[in-house]
Image (cartoon, grey):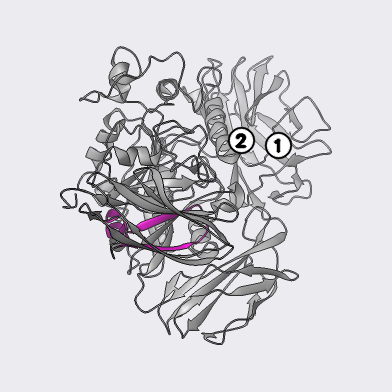
C-alpha cells in the first residue's frame, strides 16, 4: 500500500532526523551490517544485551528489525545535556495587527517567533534550532528562496552576534551563533513564511500545533528541546463532506442516536457552517425528526434520537451541503442479535507523532466518528517530546482518558504504544482507573521491559491487553518467533492505516510484507489470536482514519454493556471482527458457534454468514489454514446470506471469513480454532 509505505518511511526518517540519526540507520528494513538472525533460543536475553554481538544471534528479532535504531535512541537518551542546552524560552509573537496568529488548513500563513536567551546564554559555535512539525503539510523552513513557501527570515538586534541559518530537512532550521555569544535576554526572531508565498499550514485542524525549539547552548554538538513550545491554533478548512453514523444493532422500539458531522476535505471537524440537514425517504417505522439544524458554533456537528419500531435492516440518507447525500451505515433492528460496538483501540496525538490534543482525540471519536470505545496510544519513546520522559504529557493523556469515560455511553481505555524496533510494535491497553499501579507506562527503552516476555511479566495479573500491529511488514514486523501471551495477547490488529497484515491478496496489503510473517502464518504456529482492526491514526481522526489514508481499521466487539470491564471480557473472549474502516455488518456462525471459539475437530459443520455492506460486496471467502477453501463472487448486492458445509477439519486447524466490498473496504471474522482439547486458555 503506497500510503502505508510512505507513512512508515516518513515516521522513521523524520524522527531519526530529529535525533541527528538519518544516514546511520535504515528505516523499516533490516540493517545489512547486522548479523543474520538465528533459530529461536530458549532463553531470550535482554534487548539491551542483544543490540551488540555476541548475543545478537540468540535474539528472535523481527525480519526487518532495526537494532541500530535502538542503539541510536539509547545513545541520544544517555547523552549529557548541560543547563545551557535547556536555557531560554520561545514564544509566538502577535501579528502585525496585534492579533494572536492562527493558521487555516489549506491556506498560506505567516508566523513570527522569538527565542530569548536564558541565564547561561548561547556560546559561539552553539545554535538555536526551530523545529516545525515534519508531518501533515507544514512547509520546510528555508532561507535560500524568498519566492517559495517556508522562506524564513532570521534576525537579531544583539550587536556583534552573527547568525548563520541553514535548513537541515525534516522541518528543521538551525541557526549557528558566531561573532560573540548570545547573552541572557537577547533575542533571535524568526519570520516563518516571510516571502510572498507564506508557508503552507498543517493540513489537519488542531488546537495547539507546536513550534519546537532546541538549543545547543555550549556548542558541544548536543542539544535539548525547550520544555514549553509555542503553539498555534489551526482552523478547519471549508466544508465539503459529511459523515453520518448509527449504531449497528438495536432492539425494536429502542431509541438510537444518529450523528452527523460536516467536515472539510481532510476530515477535520470544526468547520464554519450552519444550515439544515434533511432525512431523505426515511421509512415510516423510523420515528424522529426529518430536519436537523446545524447551529452556529456547533463545529458542524448535530445529533438526534430516533426509534425504529420494526425488526429489519435500516439505512438512512441525509441530504445537505448543497444537495450532497450521504448514507448511514446499516442498522440491524433485532430483538436477539448480539449487541455490536465499534472501537478504535490505537491512535496518536500531538503528544507523540500525531496531531490534536488528547481531549480533541476523544471528542472526535465520540461525536464525529460515533465510536462506542476508544483508546489513545501515544508512543512511549518516539515523537516529541518522548512520553516516557515527560510526566506532564503522560498525566494529560490519563486525565483526558478518565474525563471522557462515560460508562453506558462511551468507553475510554488507558493506553500507550510499546515501540520496539527489535520485536515489533505493540499497543498496550489498561482497563483500570488512572490511579491503579498497573496503569503506568512500561517503555521499550527500559531494560526491564525491552522484550515482549518482560512486558507481559510487568503486566501479569492486571486488567491489561497487548496487540501486535502492522505485524507482517513496515515500519517493523512482529517477531512471531515469540509466542504471544495467551492471556495478555488474545487478539491481533490485522488492519490499520499501514494496510492489512492478513494477506497480500487482500486490498491495501501492508508495505514491505515479509514471507512467513502474515497473520495466518502466526496462526499456523498454534497461536489463538482473534482479529481486530484499528486506525493507528496520526491525523487526530480516530474511527475515520481511512478518510485520509485510504485504509484504516475498526474493531467490532460483541458486548452488551458499555463498561471497561465488559469490553475487556469480550476482547479476551475474542468476540470481535475487524474492518478496514467501513462499518460492515458481519455475522458468522459455525454450527451456531461464534468466531473466536475453540472447537473439537469435526467431520462436517454448517457455516452461516450474514453480511450487510456499506458498498456492493465483491467477494466473500472462507479461509482454512491459510488457504481459501470456499468463495462467493458478489453480483452487486450489499446484503448477503450464505450457507455452506465446511469440513472435515482436523485438530490444529483454524477457519475464518473475509469480505471485500467495492472500493476495497474489507472485513475479517475472528477465527474458529480446532483443538483435540477444547479447554480455553
> Any mark on residue 398, and which?
none
Q: Which residue is mark 1?
A: 139
Counting other residues with Cα less than 10 Å from the Cα at mark 2, is it few (<14), some (14-19), or many (20 or more)? many
Counting other residues with Cα less than 10 Å from the Cα at mark 1, is it few (<14), some (14-19), or many (20 or more)? many
Image-based side of 545 in relation to 239, left or right = left
Residue 614 higher or lower than 654, as above or below: below
- The number of callouts visible is 2
> Any mark on residue 134, and which?
2
Q: Nearer the viewer, residue 282 or 295?
A: 282
| Quadrant in the picture for residue 64 | top left
Residue 253 higher or lower than 437, as above or below: below
Residue 469 in view in this figure: yes
Q: Nearer the viewer, residue 484 or 152?
A: 484
Magenta-tinted stretch: 567-590
Marks 2/1 in contact by CB < 8 Å: the verdict is no
Image-based side of 23 in relation to 479, left or right = right
| Quadrant in the picture for residue 527 | top left
Q: Nearer the viewer, residue 140 or 643?
A: 643
Residue shown at 56% from the left, 18% from the top: 23
Residue 345 higher or lower than 561, as above or below: above
Q: Nearer the viewer, residue 309 or 638?
A: 638
* SS for callout 1: loop
Q: Position of residue 590 (x, y in %)?
A: 31, 61
Amino acid at each position: 500500500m503506497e500510503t502505508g509505505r510512505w507513512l512508515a518511511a516518513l515516521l522513521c526518517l523524520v524522527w531519526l532526523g530529529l535525533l541527528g540519526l538519518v544516514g546511520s540507520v535504515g528505516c523499516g528494513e533490516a540493517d545489512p551490517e547486522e548479523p543474520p538472525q538465528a533459530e529461536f533460543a530458549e532463553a531470550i536475553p535482554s534487548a539491551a544485551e542483544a543490540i551488540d554481538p555476541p548475543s545478537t544471534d540468540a535474539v528472535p528479532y523481527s525480519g526487518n528489525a532495526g537494532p541500530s535504531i535502538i542503539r541510536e535512541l539509547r545513545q541520544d537518551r544517555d547523552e549529557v545535556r548541560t543547563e545551557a542546552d535547556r536555557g531560554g524560552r520561545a514564544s509566538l509573537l502577535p501579528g502585525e495587527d496585534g492579533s494572536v496568529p492562527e493558521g487555516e488548513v489549506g491556506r498560506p500563513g505567516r508566523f513570527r517567533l522569538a527565542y530569548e536567551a536564558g541565564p547561561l546564554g548561547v556560546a559561539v559555535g552553539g545554535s538555536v534550532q526551530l523545529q516545525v512539525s515534519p508531518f501533515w503539510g507544514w512547509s520546510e523552513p528555508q532561507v535560500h528562496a524568498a519566492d517559495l513557501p517556508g522562506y524564513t527570515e532570521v534576525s537579531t538586534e544583539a550587536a556583534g552576534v552573527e547568525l548563520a541559518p541553514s535548513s537541515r530537512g525534516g522541518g528543521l532550521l538551525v541557526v549557528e551563533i558566531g561573532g560573540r555569544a548570545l547573552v541572557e535576554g537577547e533575542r533571535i526572531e524568526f519570520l516563518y513564511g516571510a516571502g510572498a508565498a507564506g508557508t503552507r499550514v498543517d493540513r489537519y485542524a488542531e488546537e495547539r500545533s507546536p513550534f519546537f525549539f532546541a538549543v545547543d547552548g555550549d556548542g558541544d554538538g548536543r542539544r535539548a528541546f525547550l520544555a514549553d513550545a509555542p503553539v498555534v491554533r489551526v482552523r478547519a478548512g471549508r466544508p465539503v463532506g459529511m459523515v453520518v453514523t448509527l449504531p449497528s444493532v438495536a432492539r425494536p422500539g429502542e431509541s438510537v442516536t444518529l450523528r452527523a458531522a460536516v467536515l472539510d476535505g481532510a476530515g477535520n471537524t470544526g468547520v464554519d457552517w450552519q444550515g439544515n440537514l434533511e432525512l431523505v425517504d426515511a421509512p415510516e417505522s423510523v420515528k424522529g425528526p426529518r430536519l436537523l439544524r446545524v447551529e452556529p458554533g456547533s463545529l458542524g456537528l448535530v445529533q438526534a434520537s430516533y426509534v425504529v419500531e420494526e425488526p429489519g435492516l435500516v439505512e438512512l440518507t441525509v441530504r445537505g451541503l448543497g444537495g450532497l447525500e450521504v448514507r448511514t451505515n446499516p442498522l440491524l433492528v433485532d430483538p436477539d442479535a448480539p449487541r455490536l460496538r465499534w472501537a478504535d483501540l490505537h491512535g496518536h496525538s500531538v503528544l507523540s507523532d500525531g496531531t490534536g490534543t488528547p481531549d480533541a482525540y476523544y471528542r472526535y471519536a465520540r461525536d464525529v466518528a460515533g465510536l462506542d470505545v476508544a483508546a489513545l496510544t501515544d508512543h512511549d519513546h518516539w515523537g516529541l517530546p518522548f512520553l516516557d520522559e515527560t510526566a506532564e504529557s503522560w498525566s494529560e493523556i490519563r486525565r483526558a482518558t478518565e474525563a471522557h469515560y462515560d460508562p453506558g455511553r462511551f468507553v475510554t481505555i488507558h493506553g500507550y504504544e510499546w515501540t520496539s524496533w527489535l520485536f515489533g510494535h505493540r499497543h498496550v491497553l489498561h482497563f483500570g482507573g488512572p490511579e491503579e499501579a498497573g496503569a503506568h507506562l512500561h517503555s521499550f527503552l527500559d531494560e526491564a521491559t525491552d522484550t515482549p516476555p518482560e512486558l507481559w511479566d510487568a503486566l501479569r495479573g492486571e486488567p491489561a491487553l497487548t496487540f501486535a500491529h502492522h505485524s507482517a511488514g513496515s515500519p517493523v514486523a512482529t517477531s512471531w518467533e515469540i509466542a504471544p501471551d495467551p492471556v495478555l495477547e488474545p487478539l491481533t490488529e490485522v488492519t490499520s492505516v499501514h494496510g492489512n497484515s492478513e494477506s497480500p491478496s487482500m486490498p491495501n496489503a501492508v508495505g514491505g510484507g515479509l514471507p512467513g510473517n502474515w497473520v495466518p502464518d502466526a496462526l499456523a504456529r498454534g497461536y489463538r489470536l482473534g482479529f481486530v482492526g484499528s486506525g493507528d491514526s496520526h491525523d487526530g481522526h480516530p474511527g475515520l482514519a481511512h478518510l485520509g489514508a485510504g485504509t484504516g481499521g475498526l474493531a467490532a466487539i460483541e458486548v452488551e454493556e458499555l463498561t471497561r470491564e465488559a469490553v475487556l471480557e469480550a476482547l479476551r473472549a475474542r468476540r470481535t471482527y475487524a474492518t478496514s474502516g467501513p462499518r460492515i455488518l458481519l455475522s458468522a456462525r459455525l454450527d451456531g458457534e461464534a468466531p473466536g471459539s475453540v472447537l473439537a475437530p469435526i467431520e462436517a459443520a454448517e457455516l452461516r454468514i450474514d453480511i450487510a455492506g456499506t458498498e456492493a460486496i465483491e467477494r466473500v471467502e472462507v479461509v482454512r489454514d491459510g488457504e481459501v477453501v470456499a468463495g462467493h463472487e458478489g453480483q452487486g448486492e450489499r446484503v448477503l446470506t450464505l450457507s455452506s458445509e465446511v469440513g472435515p477439519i482436523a485438530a490444529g486447524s483454524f477457519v475464518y471469513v473475509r469480505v471485500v466490498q467495492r472500493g476495497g473496504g474489507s472485513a475479517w471474522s475472528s477465527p474458529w480454532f480446532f483443538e483435540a482439547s477444547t479447554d480455553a486458555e
